Image (cartoon, rainbow, N blue to C red):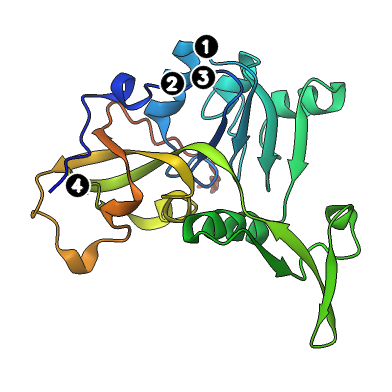
Amino acid sequence: MISKKVNGVQEALIGVEDGMTFMLGGFGLCGIPENAIAELVRLGIKNITCISNNAGVDDFGLGLLLKKHQIKKMISSYVGENDEFERQMLSGELEVELTPQGTLAEKCRAAQAGFPAFYTPAGYGTEVAEGKESREFNGKMHILEEAFKADYSFVKAWKGDAAGNLIFKGTARNFNPCMCGAATITVAEVEELVPVGALDPNQVHVPGIFVQRIFQGVDYEKRIEQRTVQVRNG
């Protein structure tokens, strides 16, 4: 069996260059590829396009890349937690393509499955549909959305083996699975890397065929994006 294991994040990101398009898994701050993001910051890669549901927060996640002005364009769905993102968007420093959340997921999934495009009713009659082909199906209008084209997908899983098989835990099973295999190279970082054969095949969420490189991550912070507390008298 072919081993996809590499010795850490630096080896995993060999080949990344300025101007590339990256997919990054996660929902909010849950299940984000923290090690890969930190390495992109360290490398100083510039003029990149990031496809991610969120844009992180000011001092964590993709917010670290925004702070260093490494991102040229963001393709996202929900971006309301990042003040620096807002500032760069309003000032014209950052290109932004807002995409309905379901459409974002399907554009990843289409790329993963090898479909060039698909029709969806989401966004018809809005700015999202501008410049896109439309067609009626069963009395309802749809717009044509093209699958994403990305150079690298960076995902984070709970467990993985040297063959690239992945298991996600809880809410981390969000955009990560549909981004696996949706780019030329998929890099998976895992909390625990085990030998081939150690995972129960019935528990595997993504088979290794969708992964080109895998490594065991370190120093995960697992931040809480928003903390809600209740103060009781007495």
Give the CA distance from mark 3 to mark 1: 10 Å
User: What crowding class fits label 4: few (fewer than 14 Cα within 10 Å), some (14-19), or many (20 or more)?
Assistant: many
Q: Position of residue 66 (x, y in %)?
A: 63, 21
Sooner in the amino-acid sequence: mark 2 or mark 4: 2
Of the two numbered discs 3 and 1 in the rendering, the one whose residue sits closer to the viewer: 3
Q: Position of residue 62 (x, y in %)?
A: 56, 29
Q: Which residue is mark 2?
A: 38
Circles 2 and 4 in contact, beta carbons < 8 Å:
no
Q: Secondary structure at mark 4?
A: loop
Give the CA distance from mark 2 to mark 1: 10 Å
Q: Nearer the viewer, residue 201 or 63?
A: 201
Sooner in the amino-acid sequence: mark 3 or mark 4: 3
Q: Is residue 121 left or right of residue 207?
A: right
Circles 3 and 4 in contact, beta carbons < 8 Å:
no
Sooner in the amino-acid sequence: mark 4 or mark 1: 1
Sooner in the amino-acid sequence: mark 2 or mark 1: 2
| 134 to 189, vertically: above or below | below
Sooner in the amino-acid sequence: mark 2 or mark 3: 3
- Identity of the amino acid at label 3? Glu
Of the two numbered discs 2 and 4 in the rendering, the one whose residue sits closer to the viewer: 4
- Seen at 28% across and 40% down, the residue is 190
Q: Secondary structure at mark 2?
A: helix
Q: Which mark is residue 44?
A: 1
- Identity of the amino acid at label 2? Ala
Q: Which residue is mark 3?
A: 17
Of the two numbered discs 4 and 1 in the rendering, the one whose residue sits closer to the viewer: 4
